[in-house]
Structures are given as structure tokens and as C-alpha cells.
Image: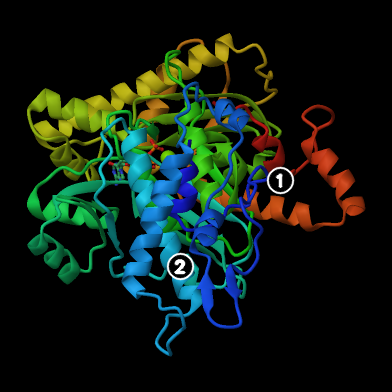
Amino acid sequence: MFGFLASLFGRHPRAPEGVPLVAEEDPTIRTPHHRVLDIKGMICQASTRVPLLRLLASGRRNVSLLSGEKIDDLINCAVRNIVDRHRLADSPSPSSPPPSQIVAEARKEFDTLLAQYLRSAQDGGTSDARPFEIVDGKPRSKGFDDMQLELGRGLHVGTVNLCAAARLKSVGDVVYGEQRNAFLDVPADESTKKMMRHLGLGYIAQGENGYIAGEGAEELGRIFGKAVRRPMKNGTLSPDEPVALFILSLLLKQVLGYPRADGEMCVYSVPADPVESDRNYIYHRGALESTLRSLGYTPRPMVESHLIVSSELKDQDYTGIGVSCGAGMVNVGVAYKGVPALSFSTLRGGDWVDQSVAEAVGISPEKVREIKEGGMDLRRPNGRLEGAIAIYYRNLLAYTVETMRQKMSDAQNMPSFAKGVPIVCAGGACRITGFLEMFKDELEKSRNFPVRIEFIRMARDPIHAVASACLQAALEETAAQTEAPSALAPATLERAAVSGKPMKGLPSLLKLRNSKVA
Ligand SMILES: Nc1ncnc2c1ncn2[C@@H]1O[C@H](COP(=O)(O)OP(=O)(O)OP(=O)(O)O)[C@@H](O)[C@H]1O
Ligand SMILES: [Mg+2]
């Protein structure tokens, strides 16, 4: 299903199931008289076999297959284009391009054709034979690809923000790569393309359709007063956007860069089970996993709220409640001594506030967001618009507290806490002044709240808490894999045990990783 992503990135993923179609040897065959480039072979090497069972396991019941003829067609077409381009003669001339360049071009050519074919097939459109043009913009900041990094990456996949984390080899500092999870459709005519090149904005064009993805989209949207489109909605791939996976894949490639070693560990955040029973995140998780594998990583999902517990509640023996308030959802996780006891997500987050206020007062959600993020205080709202924002924030928190109460009361396996437990909040929606006070108010109002709350506080770094916890988990797991098995066994067993006498100060990440994800 997601095989096209592998080709899209021009990487040969190290998926255990991946079987190269041809032996991975130098595809240049030398003859005594002239050089023949096995372009077909090179292109075949860019493909990956995916077992049907894996597709089914990722939630697909209908699997579209590319016929052998279609693959042949695509290969032939790619070969023709490259040969036309270089007009390869029987004997190499001094100006013949080096094989590495031809390999790169062959893959790119085939990737473009295959991505184009599969995108239209997967998204239900008609097959559009026009090629894609992907133009990189001027990088705004140094990307991970230019840094000396340790093995292991963290990735927070959010509805509006993508944040990757890595650790610098020399000094051990954590560095972050951030990107807006947004895109804008623009006409792909020559004058628009020229303008985008002038502004240093990267774009993707196909025929007359063009897309700008990431921060550039936000910037341009602001300048022209146009609302951006989003690949994700309410914490998961948006069902309303046919190009969602395509754009998200490109953004992930940008923010995460390529791995330093094949199969490098990448821990990424996923939402907890939604309270709405008609929703699940199986497709979203499967799509992310495939994208990360295509980039060459070994993906590991972890529940967002438990990541907050693992990064923030070390001093409380990893006992307490992690709450992540993002744009598309609120995630809540309860853990006892590092063992996840309960987690859930609701669909009310920052976007819900923006949308509700916009409908109530008749302005755009973008305008509401601007006011909300502009430094207002929930305790002392100024004027009608701020007043409406405060009303919906209170409603959001009352709803979150009530859902916590219900879920914790109904849970079969809730531990009985001997003393009060802390709540730690992270995520962009908590940054508004007065958030903690309002949350505390609502908790105090709640009758029969099943757990005594000792205190409520903000995470040390509410914006990076999840990405940084993902990175910590990835570094730990990478280290565990490289340790000698004899030295590793007792520690791993102790950490992985979910019952028995809890140990003080356990890192607990491996246990948290085993928590249930949708
Ligand atoms: N200073 C601020 N005041 C109020 N809200 C803010 C502020 N800064 C960011 N936000 C809101 O935070 C939200 C984005 O937060 P975050 O980056 O944590 O979300 P996300 O991880 O992308 O989404 P999710 O976790 O729901 O999938 C947006 O709704 C944004 O308006
Ligand atoms: Mg988030």
C-alpha cells in the first residue's frame, strides 16, 4: 500500500520483510568494448516487496495492486526519459555522466512516475500522467542532515506542528527540527513558480496544480489572507484531504532528515484511544510507520500522554497524570510507577476553541487564533472576543475533567493511589496565561473525582516535552540494542516487568512503550 513512499524518498528501506528484487551489486556491467548501464536493474532496486499480511495487519482490507505491465510501463518510460536525456552512445564519451548520477536520476525519474501513478490511484482520482516537479526551498535553519548526531530520533507528530529531536554527538545537546504541518495550494504557472523561487520557497508542482508545504505555506497564507490546508485533523491523517499522506510524508522527510544508519530507531508519538468509539488511529499509525520505514528508520509508536509522564515525573517515580493539550485533541494518560494504567484522547483542543469562537462571534478561526496566541489572560479577558475565548477554554477544561472523572471511575485496572498524584500539562494550548488556574478551578469543582490531585504544573518545556521524551526513548532503546546480551538481560527484564515490586527512579520508557496504542 505504502510502497510508493519508499520510492518517493529514493531510499531502500531496511524493513525486515523487504526483499530486494535484484541482487544488490554494482548495476554497472562492464564489457570489453563499451559500458552498459542496467537502468532497469537500478530502478528495480528502488522497489520493495511488502507482504500482504503486513498490509492487512496495518488495517487495509482492500489492497490495490500495481500490475506487472504497469510497473514495466513505468520502468520503460523512466528508461526512455533518461536515455533521451543523455543520448547514451555505444561507447562512452568523456562527457558521459558518471554511473552514480545516472543511478540517482533513474531512481528520481521512476519515483516521480510511480508516486504520480500511485497518488492518483490511492486517492481515488484518475491517473494523471503529468510529472511532478519537486523544488527544494532555501533552508530556514540547519537541517539534521548537516549535523553530527547520535543514533536515535524522536518525533512528535501533531495536528499543526511536527517536531523532531536528536542529540548532538560532540556536546550531547538536544537539537530540534520543527515544521508546520500545513500546506497551501497555489497555481503552478511560470510567474507563481518564479515568485516562489525568488522567495526561496520550495514547492511541488504537477501540471497547473502546485503545493507549498510547511512554514512557507503559513507565511504565504498570512500574506495573502488565505487559510492553509492541513494534512492532519484531530490528531490523525485528515480524511478530507486527498493529498494528506503525500504532503505529510514530504514534511516528515524535511523535519527528520535521513537516518545515520540503516534502521536507526525513531520513536514517534501517537494519540491514545479516542473516547469516541467510532474512531480509531489504525490507518494513521500504519501510514506513519510506513513513511518512517521508507525513510530508513525503525519506527516505534508511543502514546503522547505517557511520553509526558516519562519525561516529567521522574521525581514522582513516574506516577501521575500527563495531559497534552494540542491543536486537534487533548491526550490524557495515568501511570503508576511507570506502568500505564489508563489513557484516552478527546477531540477538543486549540482548534476546537478557534472554531467554536469563530462560529459564535462571526469571525474567522485564523483571527481567533491570532487573538488567543497574542498574549491574552484567561482570568482577565478583554472585550467580547477574548471573553468568548475564555468561555470556550473553560468548556474545554470542564469537558476534559469530566471525561477524566468518568474514565478513571470506570477503568478496571486503575491503581489505588496511596497519596495524591501530580498532573503535568504540555502542548501549545496550555501556553495561554491562566490555563493552570482554570484547570485547577475545574478540578476543584468536579464532584467524586476518583483520585486526589497533589498539584498541577506545566511541563518544563511544554512545546518540546513530547519530542524530547521520544528521543530519550529512542536513545535508550538504541543503547539497549548495542549492549552485550548478558549485561543487558537483567536490566531489561527488570524494566520490562509490569508487575512486581516497583523500583525507585526507573526510566520506565520501555514499559511505557508497551502501552496500548490504537
Ligand atoms: N501562546 C498560546 N496561547 C494559546 N494557544 C496557543 C499558544 N501557542 C500555541 N497555541 C495553540 O496550541 C495549539 C498547537 O499546539 P501543539 O503544537 O501542541 O499541537 P499539536 O501537537 O500540533 O496538535 P495535537 O497534539 O492536538 O495533534 C494550537 O491550537 C495553537 O493555537
Ligand atoms: Mg501534540
State which tag comes first along the sequence, 1 or 2.
2
Q: Residue at x 84, y 39 (%)?
A: 493
Residue 157 seen by the camera: no
Judge depth for marks 1 and 2 and give the one in front. 2
Which one is in front, 374 or 471? Answer: 471
In x, y percent, where is residue 129? Answer: 26, 46
Q: Is the residue 506 above or below the residue 51 in the image?
A: below
Give the quarter of the figure containing the C terminus.
top right
Please give the label number shown on residue 507. Answer: 1
In x, y percent, where is residue 181? Answer: 33, 46
Q: Quadrant of ligand 2?
A: top left
Q: Residue at x 23, y 41 (%)?
A: 229
Helix, strand or loop at mark 2: helix
- Residue beneath disc 2: 104
Residue 85 seen by the camera: yes
Q: Residue at x 10, y 57 (%)?
A: 189
In x, y percent, where is residue 78? Answer: 38, 58
Q: Residues within 10 Å of mark 2 (few under 14, many from 20)?
A: few
Q: Does the beta carbon at disc 2 come under 8 Å from ligand 1?
A: no
Mark 1 vs 2: CB contact within 8 A:
no
Amino acid type of the residue tagged 1 in the rendering? Pro
Which one is in front, 465 or 17? Answer: 17
Q: Does the beta carbon at disc 1 come under 8 Å from ligand 2?
A: no
Helix, strand or loop at mark 1: loop
Q: Residue at x 22, y 69 (%)?
A: 200
